[in-house]
Image (cartoon, coloured by chain):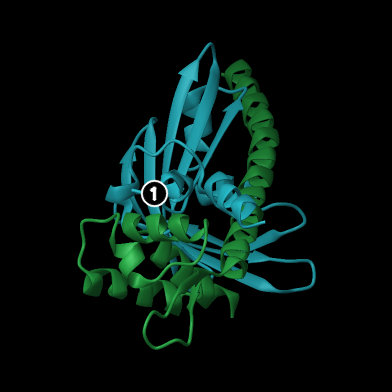
Chain colours: A green, B cyan
Amino acid sequence: MLAEHLDATFAALADPTRRAILARLASGEANVTELAKPFDMSQPAISKHLKVLERAGLISRGRDAQSRPCRLEGRRLKEATEWMERYRRFWEQSFDRLDEYLVELKKKERKNARNK
Amino acid sequence: MPETSSVVARPPELLLTRVFDAPRRLVFEAWTKAEHVSRWFAPRPFTMPRCEMDFRPGGVFRFVMRAPDGWEHPFEGAFREIVAPERIVFTGSIEEGNAVVTTLTFAEHDGKTTLTMHQTFTLESSSTRGAKEGWTLTLNQLEEQLR
């Protein structure tokens, strides 16, 4: 179900370190050692973040037991983008209706003011 | 830090602004009662067979939207903060469990009202405060990089 994906995706993206890891992986594969380097963090700490990203389907990891290179998986990110786009449209269309409704409210107010 | 880190620098959020040709008092009012909200919430041709709200801090709301094919979609949550007629903060769940925190601010100028809606899609909203750009843009940028 898409909803579960989104929940995991948004939770994974909520953390700045994990977003930075994704940004790094956008420029190519990297293993834990390489990923830990730019951060002031231990490899186990980075590994924990990688597990969250992997569970969310945002990255995949190679089979090689030694280096297990990480790769960015764009599909889940694309789903999240598309969902956000639909959600944004939902609100924009609601605001279109609110705009119309306010015209009605203003008219009603003027009428009430006249009748007073 | 790698150069590309700025690409995903922002947490999941949505920022929308809209200028309404109505005084702030009225725009705010449209959010405060079920009889108003049921008239504009959700795009056409959705209808709202259920719209209940207890507009006070801690009060809950329950909406049900119905699509033309009969499919019903609930939207529930609670009001967290109300400062009339300037600000409303509410939490809600969408898509079965995605928590969303919505902050609405109403600003009036020359009889028009600018409504700003800031939504974050996790409950870790403290880390997302002050962010100015939409998450959509950020995701798009990352996607572009992937091509």
Q: Residue at x 66, y 33 (%)?
A: A99
Dot 1 lies on which element? Answer: loop
User: Where B7 falls versus B47 (above or below)?
Assistant: above
Compared across the picture, whether A68 is left or right of A106 comes to left
Determine if residue B71 is in view. yes
Q: Label 1 crowding class (10 Å Cα cut-off): few <14, some 14-19, many 20+? A: some
Q: Work out whether residue B9 or residue B87 is closer to the camera in this orientation and state it.
A: B9
Q: How many marks?
A: 1
Q: Work out whether residue B126 or residue A23 is closer to the camera in this orientation and state it.
A: A23
User: Where B9 falls versus A86 (above or below)?
Assistant: above
Q: Residue at x 69, y 45 (%)?
A: A93
Q: Residue at x 30, y 54 (%)?
A: A38
Chain that bears disc 1: B
User: Where A16 falls versus A112 (above or below)?
Assistant: below
Q: Amino acid at mark 1?
A: Pro
Compared across the picture, whether B112 is left or right of A45 comes to right
**Picture quarter with the C terminus of chain B:** bottom right
* Residue named by callout 1: B2
Q: Work out whether residue A25 or residue B12 is closer to the camera in this orientation and state it.
A: A25
Displayed quadrant of residue B122: bottom left
Q: Position of residue A92 (x, y in %)?
A: 65, 43
Q: Position of residue B61 (x, y in %)?
A: 44, 59
* Residue projecting furthest to the top: B110
User: Where A54 falls versus B74 (above or below)?
Assistant: below
Q: Position of residue B134 (x, y in %)?
A: 51, 43
Q: Position of residue A109 (x, y in %)?
A: 60, 25
